[in-house]
């Protein structure tokens, strides 16, 4: 459970069609809320097909009616059309592809794009080793997929994908080549939804920056792109001409795990565990630290800024209404109740052994004895909060995200443990 890593949250995703639906990705599965984070329910990694020995987390996206997940580093894609209970494996052409990133197309909440990068000994341009790299699209919430017209250079392993909100045909993909001092980074730009790609160089220090990610595209300007580097230090690079030139806007001593834009793009947020949370105006890019919280992801939802953090900061998921200066806790490091689903559903396997393994790792299971069995109304019927009954997957119990913390000494000890984690790319994404 968590694959030996310290339990943590590292991505927040919001439904484009249900303002109350929030999905929090953690190192021990995902937790879902249908009421804006007041109550949460747990879904185990087993349902998503995550390899038990993997230290990578699944790639997630929420479309209008589905949760779409890629169990990286395993190949394939799974889709839940009822937000958590039933999970269907995507068939061809994605069955044997490694999905590196997912994005829901702005303004088209039923449309999801999947970026693949699958190594093969004959995938190179000359018939040698390389990466088979494509962008696949689904216009029906992940039920069916088809490839976009042009593949991406097989010599540059892709890392992330974003779509411009102001130009639905503009797609950006980040990639790297080589290793150590010979490493280079590129931004692949398409102005025709992937029918063709133009490669543009991204300036990195090959000795200290190992990867790049498209953090976001300005919602008002399709040419303005934010690129985040992975390294120590890590940097935020900004281009206003679709990758022709760059400005280094922020440097952090630790990996930049969080990035987000306000809905109109006028405010820019970034942060790390080591450096805290920074905010700047789009026009000036003069970043100032606004909070010392340990940032592990960032995302905006309307006027609110959400963050993944840790218990020493006061929460693993919190929300701010004052641009990150203060946060209200929405979730703590507790074993939330299991999603209640029909006996034959995919999610039903989260009770029993997976639940017991979670309960051995986290506090919060006293009400179900680690077996996932909820309290009943005396007649054997699980007690289910009314706020979740209409969503296909009823919650077990009503433990909210703002319950009291466990003993401070427990969390202080847990905070000292090290863990490996590939950082998010973009607004709360890996």
Image: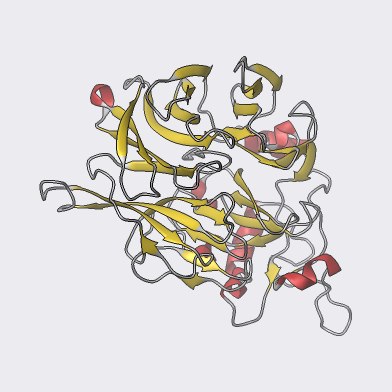
Query: Residue, x 75% and y 56% (percent of image)?
Result: 20
Residue at 41 percent across and 32 percent down: it is 212
In this view, 424 is above or below 94? above
Quadrant hosting residue 265: top right
Please name whichever residue, 237 or 51, is drawn nearer the observer in this view of the structure: 237
- Position of residue 161 relative to residue 218, above or below, is below
Residue at the far right: name it.
378
Q: How is the image coloured?
A: secondary structure
Q: Most extreme residue toward the bottom, as rendered?
A: 379
Identified at 49% across, 64% down, the residue is 139
219 with respect to 90 (left or right): right
| Quadrant including the N terminus | bottom right
Q: Is residue 110 above or below residue 196?
A: below
Residue 8 or residue 288, whichever sits in front: 288
Q: Position of residue 90 (x, y in %)?
A: 43, 69
Can residue 413 be seen at all in this image of the molecule?
Answer: yes
Total residue callouts: 0
Q: Is residue 315 visible?
A: no
Whether residue 265 is situated above or below residue 33 in the rendered picture: above
Q: Position of residue 96 (x, y in %)?
A: 32, 64
The x and y percentages for residue 370 are 69, 65
Horizontal side of 187 relative to 325 (left or right) equals left
Residue at image coords 11%, 50%: 127
x, y (%) of residue 317?
A: 70, 43
């Amino acid at each position: 459970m968590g694959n030996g890593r310290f339990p943590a949250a590292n991505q927040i995703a919001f439904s484009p069609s249900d303002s109350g639906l929030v999905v929090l990705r953690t190192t021990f599965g995902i937790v879902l809320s249908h009421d804006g984070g007041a109550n949460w329910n747990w879904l185990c990694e087993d349902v998503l097909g995550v390899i038990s020995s993997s230290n990578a987390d699944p790639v997630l996206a929420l479309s209008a009616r589905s949760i779409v997940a890629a169990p990286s580093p395993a190949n394939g894609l799974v889709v839940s059309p009822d937000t958590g209970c039933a999970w269907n494996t995507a068939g061809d052409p994605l069955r044997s592809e490694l999905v590196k990133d997912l994005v829901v197309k702005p303004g088209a909440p039923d449309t999801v794009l999947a970026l693949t990068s699958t190594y093969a000994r004959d995938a190179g341009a000359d018939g040698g080793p390389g990466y088979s790299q494509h962008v696949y699209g689904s216009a029906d919430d992940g039920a069916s997929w088809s490839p976009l017209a042009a593949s991406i250079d097989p010599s540059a392993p892709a890392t992330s994908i974003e779509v411009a909100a102001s130009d639905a045909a503009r797609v950006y993909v980040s990639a790297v080549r080589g290793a150590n001092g010979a490493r280079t980074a590129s931004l692949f730009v398409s102005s025709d939804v992937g029918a063709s790609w133009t490669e543009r160089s991204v300036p990195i220090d090959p000795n200290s920056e190992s990867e790049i990610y498209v953090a976001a595209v300005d919602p008002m300007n399709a040419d303005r792109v934010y690129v985040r580097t992975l390294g120590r230090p890590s940097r935020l690079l900004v281009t206003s001409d679709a990758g022709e030139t760059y400005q280094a806007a922020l440097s952090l001593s630790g990996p930049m795990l969080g990035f987000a834009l306000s809905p109109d793009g006028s405010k820019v947020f970034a942060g790390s565990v080591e450096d805290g949370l920074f905010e700047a105006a789009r026009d000036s890019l003069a970043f100032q630290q606004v909070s010392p919280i340990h940032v592990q992801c960032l995302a905006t939802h309307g006027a609110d800024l959400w963050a993944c953090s840790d218990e020493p900061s006061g929460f693993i998921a919190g929300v701010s209404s004052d641009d990150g200066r203060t946060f209200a806790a929405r979730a703590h490091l507790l074993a939330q109740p299991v999603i209640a689903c029909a006996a034959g559903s995919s999610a039903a396997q989260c009770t029993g052994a997976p639940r017991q393994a979670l309960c051995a790792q986290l506090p919060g299971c006293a009400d179900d004895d680690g077996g996932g069995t909820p309290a009943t109304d005396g007649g054997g019927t699980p007690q289910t909060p009314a706020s979740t009954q209409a969503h296909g997957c009823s919650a077990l119990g009503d433990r909210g995200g703002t319950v009291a913390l466990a003993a401070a000494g427990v969390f202080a000890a847990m905070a000292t443990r090290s863990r490996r984690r590939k950082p998010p790319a973009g607004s709360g994404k890996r």
